[in-house]
Image (cartoon, helix red, strand yellow):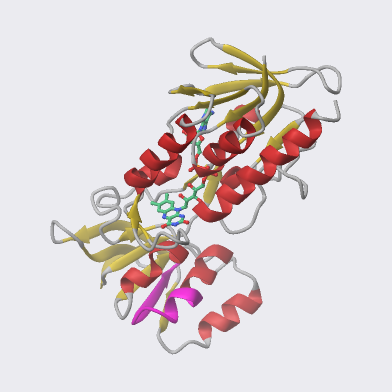
C-alpha cells in the first residue's frame, strides 16, 4: 500500500507527488493522461519566473521533475471508484477502469476539470486560434481586438468586464433572455463603453479564414434569423466542469456543481483524503494555483500520516 496516492497528473498532481516523495514516503501517482489541461494549452505566459512556455513543454518538464524522485507513476489509468477506509487511519482504496486496485493511507485527489464546450462547427478547428476559454490566460493576446464572450453567468460577465479593459471591443452573447450574473456585475458591464450585450442568441458556428477565427454566427431566438459578428476572438464561458463523476455517491462532500470541498489544509470531509487544484472549491483555476494547492494537500497528507 502507498502512504500517499495521488489521483491525477496535471500541475496539482505533479506538485503533490513531488512534495510527498521528498518526505521519503511511499508515493504513487495514477493519471488518465499525465499533464492534464496543460497538455492542451499553447502559450503560457503567467507561470511566474518563466516568461513564456508552451503546454507540451511544461508537461515534459513536470514529468521529468517527478521522475527525479521515487514515485510510482501509473499513466493512462482512469479511476472509477473510491472506497473510503473503514476506520480512521485505515487504507483507502481506488479502483481503475483497467481493473487495477490501489490502496493508500492517504489520497490526494487532483483530477482537475474541463471547460464546457459549445459543440458548434468551427470550435475545435479554431481552438487556440481565436477560440479561448481562460480570460486570465489569453486575454492579453487579444489586445485592441474584437472579441465575444459566450455566456452571461458570473464567469462570463466577469470575463467580459476583465476583457473590456484589454481588448478593443467585447460582445457578450447570452442564450437566454436575461443574464444570470449578479446584478452588481451586470450593472458594471452595462456601464462600459466598449461592450455590447446580445440576449436570446444561440451561437451556431465559429467561422475563420482557415488559420484564425474571423467571426461567429448566432441565431436570434426571437426571429430565428441567423446573424454574424466579425471578430478575432471568442471566449467560451459556459461552465467549468470538475472531473468528479467517479466520486458520486461517495462520502466525499462536494458542492452542487461537483467541486470537492476542502479545508485550509486541503483535506476533504473524509479523514486522510485530500484534494487539490481545479477539482476543488479553490477559487481561480490556474496552473500556479493548482501547483500551490497540490503542495499544500501533500503537506496536509504528510501531517495526517505522522499523527496516525
Ligand atoms: P488538470 O490539469 O485538469 O489535470 C487533471 C489530471 O487528472 C489529468 O492528469 C487527468 O488526466 C487526470 N484525471 C481526470 N479524471 C481522472 C480519473 N477519473 N482518473 C484518473 N485521472 C484522472 N492556466 C494558467 O495558469 N495559464 C494558462 O495560460 C492557461 N491556459 C489554459 C488553456 C487551456 C486551453 C485550458 C483548458 C486551461 C488553461 N489554464 C491555464 C488552466 C490550467 O490548465 C488549469 O488550471 C490547471 O491545469 C489545473 O491543474 P489540475 O492539476 O488541477 O488539473
Q: Position of residue 261 (x, y in %)?
A: 73, 44
Q: In this orientation, which residue lies closer to the viewer: 136 or 103?
A: 103
Q: Position of residue 177 (x, y in %)?
A: 51, 68
On screen, residue 270 above or below 187 = above
Q: Is residue 297 left or right of residue 139?
A: right
Q: In this orientation, which residue lies closer to the viewer: 274 or 96?
A: 274
Q: Is residue 236 magenta?
A: no
Q: Position of residue 167 (x, y in %)?
A: 36, 78
Q: Is residue 280 left or right of residue 273?
A: left
Q: Position of residue 265 (x, y in %)?
A: 76, 46
Q: Residue at x 52, y 38 (%)?
A: 14
Picture quarter with the N terminus = top right
Q: Residue at x 51, y 16 (%)?
A: 97
Q: Is residue 223 left or right of residue 122?
A: right
| Picture quadrant where residue 297 is located | top right
Q: Is residue 42 left or right of residue 200?
A: left
Residue 270 visible somewhere in the drawing: no
Q: Residue at x 44, y 60 (%)?
A: 134
Tell me the magenta residue range: 161-174
Residue 219 visible somewhere in the drawing: yes
Q: Is residue 168 magenta?
A: yes
Amino acid at each position: 500500500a502507498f502512504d500517499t496516492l495521488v489521483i491525477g497528473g496535471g500541475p496539482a498532481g505533479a506538485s503533490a507527488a513531488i512534495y510527498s516523495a521528498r518526505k521519503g514516503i511511499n508515493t504513487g501517482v495514477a493519471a488518465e493522461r499525465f499533464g492534464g489541461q496543460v497538455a492542451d494549452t499553447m502559450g503560457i505566459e503567467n507561470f511566474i519566473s518563466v516568461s513564456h512556455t508552451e503546454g507540451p513543454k511544461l508537461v515534459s518538464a513536470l514529468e521529468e521533475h517527478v521522475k527525479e524522485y521515487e514515485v510510482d507513476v501509473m499513466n493512462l489509468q482512469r479511476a472509477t471508484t473510491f472506497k473510503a477506509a473503514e476506520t480512521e487511519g485505515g487504507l483507502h482504496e481506488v479502483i481503475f477502469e483497467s481493473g487495477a486496485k490501489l490502496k493508500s493511507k492517504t489520497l490526494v485527489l487532483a483530477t482537475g476539470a474541463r471547460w464546457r464546450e459549445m459543440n458548434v462547427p468551427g470550435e475545435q478547428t479554431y481552438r487556440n486560434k481565436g477560440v479561448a476559454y481562460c480570460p486570465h490566460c489569453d486575454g492579453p493576446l487579444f489586445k485592441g481586438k474584437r472579441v465575444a464572450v459566450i455566456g452571461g453567468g458570473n464567469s462570463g460577465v466577469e470575463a467580459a468586464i476583465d476583457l473590456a479593459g484589454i481588448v478593443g471591443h467585447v460582445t457578450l452573447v447570452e442564450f437566454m433572455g436575461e443574464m444570470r450574473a449578479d446584478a452588481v456585475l451586470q450593472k458594471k458591464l452595462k456601464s462600459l463603453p466598449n461592450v455590447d450585450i446580445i440576449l436570446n442568441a444561440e451561437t451556431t458556428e465559429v467561422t475563420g479564414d482557415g488559420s484564425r477565427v474571423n467571426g461567429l454566427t448566432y441565431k436570434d431566438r426571437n426571429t430565428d434569423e441567423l446573424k454574424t459578428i466579425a471578430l478575432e476572438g471568442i471566449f467560451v464561458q459556459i461552465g467549468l466542469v470538475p472531473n468528479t463523476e467517479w466520486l458520486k455517491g461517495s462520502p466525499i462532500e462536494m458542492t452542487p456543481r461537483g467541486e470537492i470541498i476542502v479545508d485550509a489544509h486541503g483535506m476533504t470531509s473524509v479523514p486522510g483524503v485530500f484534494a487539490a487544484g481545479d477539482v476543488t472549491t479553490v477559487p481561480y483555476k490556474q496552473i500556479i494555483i493548482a501547483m500551490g494547492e497540490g503542495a499544500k494537500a501533500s503537506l496536509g497528507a504528510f501531517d495526517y500520516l505522522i499523527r496516525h
